[in-house]
Amino acid sequence: MPVKHMLAASAGEVWRCWGLNPGLRTYQARALPLSYNLLSEGHTVVYSHRECVACLIRVPSEVVKQRAQVSASSGTFHIFSNILCQEGIQGLYRGYKSTVLREIPFSLVQFPLWESLKALWSWRQDHVVDSWQSGVCGAFAGGFAAAVTTPLDVAKTRIMLAKAGSSTASGNVLSALHGVWRTQGLSGLFAGVFPRMAAISLGGFIFLGAYDQTRSFLLELGRERP
């Protein structure tokens, strides 16, 4: 089961980052070959469906947001138009590969760990976890996944904020990581780890707890139907 969750989470990340048709439904996933059918395992179909088009707007919005944060004197629209004029559409999608390389390991860690923590808690209390308990497990899983993928997040940020035409702006993740390690060491690779853990832990508690609550409600609703 952990392997299935890992593969399903990875497939979901790749599919959503390439803008998979948002009309995908669970019954369609079940009709696909076995390798794609992993998407129907547990929560990953819902997650993939919700996120399938997110990367189409996530990377451009992240580029604009980060540049706005380091250039407070410029407005968001001004930054957006400057990127288009100076770098074209490629500028808005700078850091696309590094974003994918961050999201896949994140999901590989978060979802199997979430399932394992829920299973352990259920075993200890001898009944299935409640939605709030699922949220707590999601918070721990998200925080841990955020911590171990922080170096990839740092590399993504450096790539997105690098000066156009520089070696870092080319999008080479290993080169960006090596540059941070050479100039700042381990502390540079894990810069911002605690705020990142806090934000993602809170998001994991809300998102995964709400997911389990909704899933339980829909299952109960299905049982009540004749």
Image (tube, helix red, strand yellow):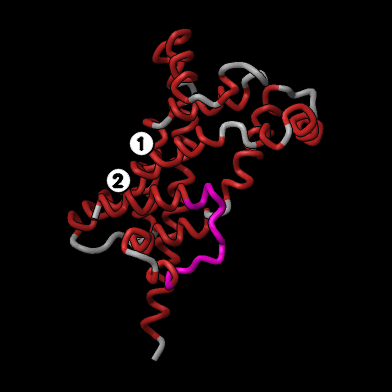
Cα separation, mark 1 vs mark 2, equals 9 Å
Residue nearest the viewer, comparing 122 with 87: 87
- Residue appearing at x 65%, y 19% in the figure: 165
- Residue appearing at x 42%, y 64% in the figure: 213
Find out whether residue 24 is within the magenta segment: yes
Residue 140: x percent and y percent?
35, 42
Total marks drawn? 2
Quadrant (top left/top right/bottom left/bottom right) for the N terminus: bottom left
Quadrant (top left/top right/bottom left/bottom right) for the C terminus: bottom left
Checking the image for residue 225, the label placed there is: none
Residue, disc 2: 113
- Asked if the residue at tag 2 contacts the one at tag 1, i.e. Cβ–Cβ closer than 8 Å, the answer is yes
Please say if 15 is above or below 71: below
Q: Residue furthest front?
A: 33
Residue, disc 1: 144
Residue nearest the viewer, comparing 206 with 155: 155
Q: Which stretch is magenta?
A: 15-27
- Residue appearing at x 48%, y 68% in the figure: 25
What is the secondary structure assignment of the residue under circle 2?
Answer: helix
Q: Amino acid at mark 1?
A: Phe
Asked if residue 22 lies left or right of residue 9, the reply is: right
Q: Amino acid at mark 2?
A: Leu
- Residue appearing at x 42%, y 56% in the figure: 209
Find out whether residue 222 is within the magenta segment: no
Q: Residue furthest top?
A: 183
Residue 27: x percent and y percent?
42, 73
